[in-house]
Image (spheres, grey):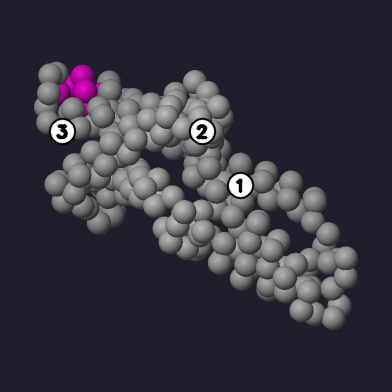
Amino acid sequence: MYELLTGPMLWLVFAISFGGLLVRIVLYFKGLSQQLDRVAYLPHLSYGLKGAFRSIISWLNPVGARGWRKKPGFTFIFFAFHIGLLATPIFLAAHNTMLQENLGFSLPQMPAFLADLLSWTVIVACVAIILRRIALPEVRILTTAYDYLLLVITVAPFVTGLIARYQMGDYQFWLLAHIITGEIWLLCLPFTKLSHCVLFFCSRAQLGMDYGIKRGGLKGSTFSW
């Protein structure tokens, strides 16, 4: 089972997940290109590219956007959750060992204590996010069972990974559970709201580009509405 999950099944999951995300990106910009007024926009594309870059950097900076500064507690939880969610699987020593065995190269590996800390951070932050969705009426009214399910799918690989790491119970069972939940999470990326892992950058770039083009166009004498 381990060889199946870390061999053919893993490659299939990667193909579906990353291929699906690529399709989502292409479809996003294809739909966007059909809506743009090329006559008005193309002459001011340089303003748009600058605006797209500024928009993305601003939202990746915890103090770069007014919305982040207004909610420091939530901002801290949000960024801690996503940093752990991204960094842990990429730089985990065990994952890079598999990468070396299958592809002949590996990425820098983080110390075990740091991987544990980030994994616990993801779990605690996820619980805080769930409690926030329950406690705040303006958030609770927008939350469905689907949203909670996605949070469970997201955090499950970290829970099972820590259980296997500390060898609580049957190690082989929890190791397989960790691999399966991780592959389920990857498969969900292109087909659910989790696709925001790439569409976030697309939408921020679009908004920043639109604002940059309009703002830059107003400075030029040839731009008209």
Q: Which mark is residue 139?
A: 2
Marks 3 and 1: in contact by CB < 8 Å? no
The C terminus lies in quadrant:
bottom right
Residue 223 screen position, x and y as percent:
84, 73
Which residue position is annotated with label 1?
A: 25
Give, as a three-letter code, the residue at label 1. Ile
- Identify which residue is drawn at 16% across, 51% down: 111
Give, as a three-letter code, the residue at label 3. Arg
Marks 2 and 3: in contact by CB < 8 Å? no
Element carrying mark 1: helix
Whole-number angstrom distance, CA of label 3 to CA of label 2 = 35 Å
Whole-number angstrom distance, CA of label 2 to CA of label 1 = 28 Å
Residue 5 screen position, x and y as percent:
32, 27
- Identify which residue is drawn at 20% across, 52% down: 110
Q: Which mark is residue 126?
A: none
- Looking at the rendering, the stretch of residues picked out in magenta corresponds to 171-176
Which residue position is annotated with label 3?
A: 165
Q: Earlier in the sequence, mark 2 or mark 1?
A: 1
Whole-number angstrom distance, CA of label 1 to CA of label 3 = 35 Å
